[in-house]
Amino acid sequence: MRCALLLVLLCGCPEHGSRPGGPTSDATDPEICLAQLNAALDRTCTVPSDCVLIDHGDCCGIVKLGVRIGTEASAMAAENSFQVCRACPPLGCAHPDLAEDGNIPSMGQSIVATCLSNRCTSVVQ
């Protein structure tokens, strides 16, 4: 039992794999839930001002996502659907707010929405 708990803590968030204790059903498979979220988000842009940040919960904390400005309501509806699909179990993990580039802001930095290759995303600057 201790080994299983330690494995969960060391492996971190199950966002990129199956849940501890066995395979997941199709309804709650993390990859399927994430794919559905990404398909529902409008991330089209031509300049950084086309983008805005929304909060995405990954079972261990918040990842700031860049989406097209004006689509925040539909993006949050997609996020709510993701949370229902994902049904995060208690994991005992936590992380500070992250940008999509995987970085955490240091002192004097922040997470900002930007447009890279005509796609809204978030980065630390």
Image (cartoon, rainbow, N blue to C red):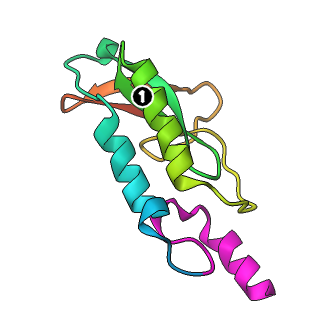
Give the camera-side residue of 45 and 84.
84
The answer to whether 98 is drawn above or below residue 117 in the figure is below
Query: Around disc 1, counting alpha carbons within 10 Å, would you say few (fewer than 14), some (14 to 19), or many (20 or more)?
Result: many
Q: Position of residue 15 (x, y in %)?
A: 51, 59
Q: Position of residue 110 (x, y in %)?
A: 55, 26
The kind of secondary structure element at disc 1 is helix
- Which residue occupies 64% across, 45% down? 61
Q: Which residues are magenta?
A: 1-21
Q: Amino acid at mark 1?
A: Ala
**Residue 29 placement: quadrant:** bottom left
* Residue 125 visible in the snapshot: no
The answer to whether 11 is drawn above or below residue 75 in the figure is below
Magenta stretch, overall SS: helix
Q: Which residue is mark 1?
A: 75
The answer to whether 107 is drawn above or below residue 98 in the figure is above
The answer to whether 63 is drawn above or below residue 20 in the figure is above
Q: Position of residue 9 (x, y in %)?
A: 70, 70
Give the camera-side residue of 35 and 65.
35
- Which residue occupies 66% across, 49% down? 95
Q: Position of residue 108 (x, y in %)?
A: 61, 24
**Residue 101 placement: quadrant:** top left
